[in-house]
Amino acid sequence: MIRRIVTSAQEMEALGEALAPVLPGGSVLLLHGDLGAGKTTFVRGLGRGFGITSPVRSPTFAFIHHHDVPEGPVTELLHLDLYRVDDPREVDALCVGELMGDEVVAVVEWGELAGGRLDGVIGSLTIAAGDDTERTLTLDGPLAALVHDAGVWR
């Protein structure tokens, strides 16, 4: 487990950006946190780390946004938001497994609502709000070891 405290949106984006080179293709990262905690801000930084120049916005009403990665071993970032899911069986209808491949990374906001229905989960990032700007990030799972070994997030 890795724990970090950030005090600005810029720091949150920087952590996302630093994580991009560590995420292997075929992996799924689950994001947890209350509304306004910074999940989409984190994904915006992750997108920048992958070289994505198109806007990264919350896919709350679309469920999934696809972002092409211009170069590298990862060719696509899937950004999912399950906030509106009432039953984990609804996740099956999104066909995430069919969208995944060895060159795709998926980041899932409100990942706990998937009810364990997503394959390839490499880690879980929980963002807990403190005061107006402070956030505590806790990274669990195999991704935490990859982040530690790569020396990012120091």
Image (spheres, grey):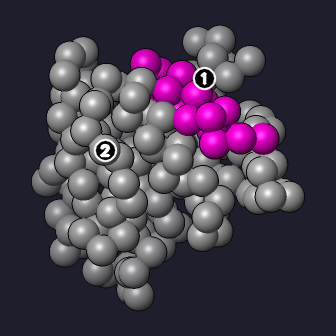
Counting labels gives 2
Residue 116 location, quadrant: bottom left
Q: Is residue 23 visible?
A: no
For the residues carrying marks 2 and 1, which lies nearer the camera in this image? 2
Amino acid found under the numbered disc labelled 1:
Val
Q: In this orientation, does residue 153 appear?
A: yes
Q: Check the image and name the residue furthest to the left.
A: 98
Magenta stretch contains residue 1: no
How far from the left and from the top, in percent, is residue 110? 50, 66
Residue bearing the label numbered 2: 55
Q: Is residue 109 above or below residue 62?
A: above
- Mark 2 residue element: loop
Residue nearest the observer in this picture, 56 or 78: 56
Residue drawn at the location 56% of the way across and 35% of the way down: 13
Quadrant that contains the C terminus? top right
- Residue 147, disc: 1
Q: Which three-letter amino acid code belongs to the residue tagged 2?
A: Pro
Q: Say whether residue 108 is left or right of residue 151.
A: left
Q: Nearer the viewer, residue 72 or 112?
A: 72
**Residue at 31% of width from left, 23% of height from top?**
51
Quick check: 76 left or right of 109? left
Residue 92 falls in image quadrant: bottom left
Instruction: Tell me which segment is drawn in magenta.
Output: 7-22
Residue 103 % position (x, y): 21, 29
Q: Where residue 127 sits: x, y (%)?
A: 68, 53
Binning the other alpha carbons within 10 Å of mark 2 as few (below 14), some (14 to 19) or many (20 upward) gives few
